[in-house]
Image: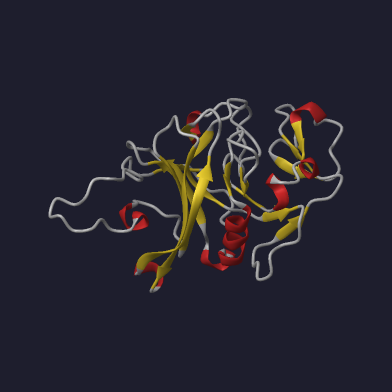
Amino acid sequence: MRPGVVAVLVSASLLLLGAAPADGSAPRPLPDRMADTGGGTQLITAVAPDTGSTTGTITWWDREGGDRGRWVAAGSAPARFGSGGLIEGATRVQGTNTTPTGLYDLPYAFGIEAAPRGTAYRYRPVHEDSWWCQDNASPAYNRWTEPRPADCDAAEAEHLITYSAQYAHALVVGFNYDRPVRGRGAGIFLHVDGRGATAGCVSVPKEAMRRILRWADPAERPHIAIGTSGGPMAVTRY
């Protein structure tokens, strides 16, 4: 993935769906209507009906024919979002249980269970001492740590192994990751469904997560675009 990605404002109509072309023809695939898909030939779109929704659809796409080819859906599944709905990533506040909209890279995968056969992504196994620090005062903010450093309060960190269902398999979403802004949020992942809405992540059924991991190829520079279909969404890459 590209380190040090700067903020880039993308078209506000990025995920505005539902309206057919005026001539009555079928709409082009969603990625073909996006101003920016991250520059790779793989893309995940996670789309909710509106910003107050906690459910929607995730689709993973391949760009056939290289950089100028047409996007083709490789699979789709139901998705869950934060219990607080969705909010633009640049204005998100930590602790609001909102899912940040935007276009993000996917730095690496991890999981309590072994990687599905065929996974090409770097896959980090979760151990008993694996934590994700969310303590704004810690230098380890929004980072995986083993073990948890003394300056990261346990009450402000996720003990990854305790989320046996959700973190069976996951991909790190690059929200607020390259240059973390304190108070914006930490630990945003694409992971396996739990019992309901998430605390800000995007989740999918376990088999869908396994399929995504077998499909995703870091050489194709996949990104995830999170947004809504019920209105315009300004997408910012971080």
Task: Establish if 98 lies above or below 63.
Answer: above
Q: Position of residue 134 (x, y in %)?
A: 71, 33
Q: Name the residue at the bottom extreme.
A: 65
Q: Name the residue at the left extreme.
A: 23
Locate residue 74 relative to residue 186 in the image: left or right: left
Tally of numbered tags: 0
Q: Quadrant of the N terminus?
A: bottom right
Q: How is the image coloured?
A: secondary structure
Q: Nearer the viewer, residue 34 or 114?
A: 114
Q: Position of residue 17 (x, y in %)?
A: 31, 45
Locate residue 14 relative to residue 187 in the image: left or right: left
Task: Establish if 184 lies above or below 195.
Answer: above
Q: Quadrant of residue 64?
A: bottom left
Task: Establish if 145 lies above or below 88.
Answer: below
Q: Position of residue 182 (x, y in %)?
A: 63, 29
Residue 8, visible in the rendered structure: no
